[in-house]
Image (cartoon, rainbow, N blue to C red):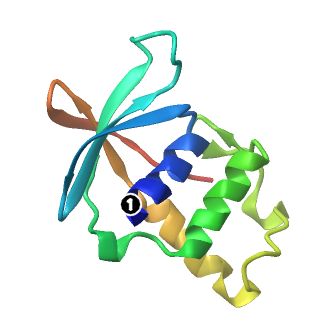
Amino acid sequence: MKRQTFLKSFLGALGAVDIIWTDTQIDKIYGTVIYDLSDFDERQDFVWHMTEDNVPNENVKKLVDFLSTNNLVDIDKIIRPIEQLDINFIDKSEHNNVWDELFEIEVKMLDDGQETDSYFLHD
């Protein structure tokens, strides 16, 4: 369940308006990202190789939600220098670790059942 909650935030920051969950295994979760509910072509299958125990921590989710709420992501890039963002909801001593953990996230896109490109965020 933590995987789905986190992915909904993460993929939402990248433009997803909805997600269809298609399979959950112990070490990965599958689904389809929907970008436009009225256009069937605006969908992308994905797999995230992640166990429930290793989902990024709550501070990473808060950071993703902050970026999304404040429209700070364009496609996969954070549009302002991270040093200029007022991240007052995470202890200053944790900032570097939280950003590092966010930038390590990679969700693989699936095309015809094959892993191809990736969803990720960068500055």
Q: Amino acid at mark 1?
A: Arg
Q: Does the image show residue 121? A: no
| Location of residue 60 with respect to 20 vertically, above or below | below
With 80 as the anchor, is 75 left or right in this view?
left
- Please tell me which residue lies in front, 48 or 77: 48
The picture quadrant where one finds residue 74 is top right
Q: Quadrant of the N terminus?
A: bottom left
Q: Quadrant of residue 32?
A: top left
In this rendering, would 95 be left or right of 104?
A: right
Q: Residue at x 67, y 78 (%)?
A: 95
- In the image, residue 113 sits, relative to residue 41, either above or below, namely below
Secondary structure under badge 1? Answer: helix
Place of residue 54 in the rendered image (x, y in percent of width and height, measured from the top left): 34, 74
Residue 43 rendering spot, x and y as whole percentages: 39, 22
Q: Residue at x 51, y 24 (%)?
A: 35
Depth check: give the residue in front, 7 or 111: 7
* Percent position of residue 7, x then y: 45, 52
Query: How many numbered marks does the figure carry?
Result: 1
Which residue carries the number 1 mark?
A: 3
Residue 82 visible in the picture: yes
Query: Does residue 88 lie above or below 49 as drawn?
Result: below
Query: Residue placed at 25% from the left, 57% from the top?
Result: 49
| Disc 1 packing (10 Å; few <14; some 14–19; many ≥20) | some
In the image, farthest residue toward the bottom: 93
Residue at 56% across, 31% down: 17
Q: Give residue 8's position: percent from left, percent from top.
A: 49, 48
